[in-house]
Amino acid sequence: METANLKKTLKILAKSSQRPRPVKTDITPPGAKEGEKIAFYLDEVFTKEECKELIRCSEEKGYVQALVNIGFGRQKLMTDYRNNQRCLIDTTELASIFWERLAEFIPQTIRGYQALGLNERLRFLRYDPGEYFKPHFDGCYERENGEISLVTVQIYLNEGFSGGSTTFLPFSGLDSGSPVECVPKIGRVLIFEHRLHHEGSVLKAGRKYAIRSDVMYSKDKQQ
């Protein structure tokens, strides 16, 4: 992406100012016992000014039709399944700033894997009325050196629209319980393990912006 555009964004997010400590709220997805699955959101992680700047940065680069991961590193356009727009920005600097704010809340070990930081591939998401991402499980992002993603990070950049929640759903009748919504809010970050069934519910009115990233893990050699 354009260097000047990214520098402006980094400068705003790197400002040294006192921020309130994020407030954590746990989520119990359908079919899970309390605390059994990794699922929670944090409020007040990003300010309104920071979210506005992140939106501006993505719009300056531009959005294209989002593709669907179909496995083995392949993606496909499937508008009957997912019809929103996205903007890909690869930036280790921005991912590092995000990680500094989130790391203390992230599980540092999962099934023998050790947390490393955030995926530098930031997927900015834009939804307009009628757009959605139907029920799915998030796929793993895998690097050639064996590092993989296990946890989803969803950053909400705006609010004031209708619909567009991230909704956790029972899977094929195997899970008991009702759907559980996470309603987007400026500066809120939703964090959950990839293995949870969910959807990007249809946006009814307004425009929604979010960022999707992942927590990257590597196999703990001491295991």
Image: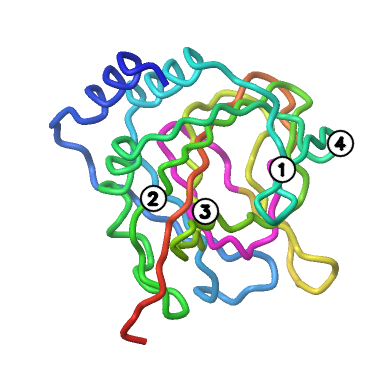
- In the picture of the structure, the residue carrying the numbered disc 1 is 75
Residue highlighted by disc 3: 152
> First in sequence: mark 1 or mark 4?
1
Tell me how far mark 2 sits from mark 3, CA to CA. 10 Å
Q: Position of residue 6 (x, y in %)?
A: 33, 21
Image quadrant where one finds the C terminus? bottom left
Q: Amino acid at mark 3?
A: Thr
In the rendering, which numbered label is found on residue 80?
4
Element at label 1: strand
Task: Name the residue located 41 percent from the left edge and 43 percent from the top edge.
Answer: 120
Q: Earlier in the sequence, mark 2 or mark 1?
A: 1
Badge 3 crowding class, 10 Å Cα cut-off, few under 14, some 14 to 19, many 20 or more, is many
Spatial distance from mark 1 to mark 3, Cα to Cα? 18 Å
**Magenta part of the protein: which range?**
182-200
Residue 77 part of the magenta segment? no
Given the image, on which type of amino acid does mark 1 rest? Gln
**Could you say which disc has been placed on residue 118 in the image?**
2
| Residue 82 placement, left or right of 124 | right
Helix, strand or loop under label 4? loop
Q: Residue at x 22, y 23 (%)?
A: 11
Disc 2 residue type? Leu
The N terminus lies in which quarter of the figure?
top left
Which residue is nearer to you in this view: 196 or 36?
Answer: 196
- State the image coordinates of residue 150 (x, y, percent, origin top left): 51, 63
Residue nearest the viewer, comparing 72 with 115 = 72
Of the numbered discs 2 and 3, the one sitting upstream in the chain is: 2
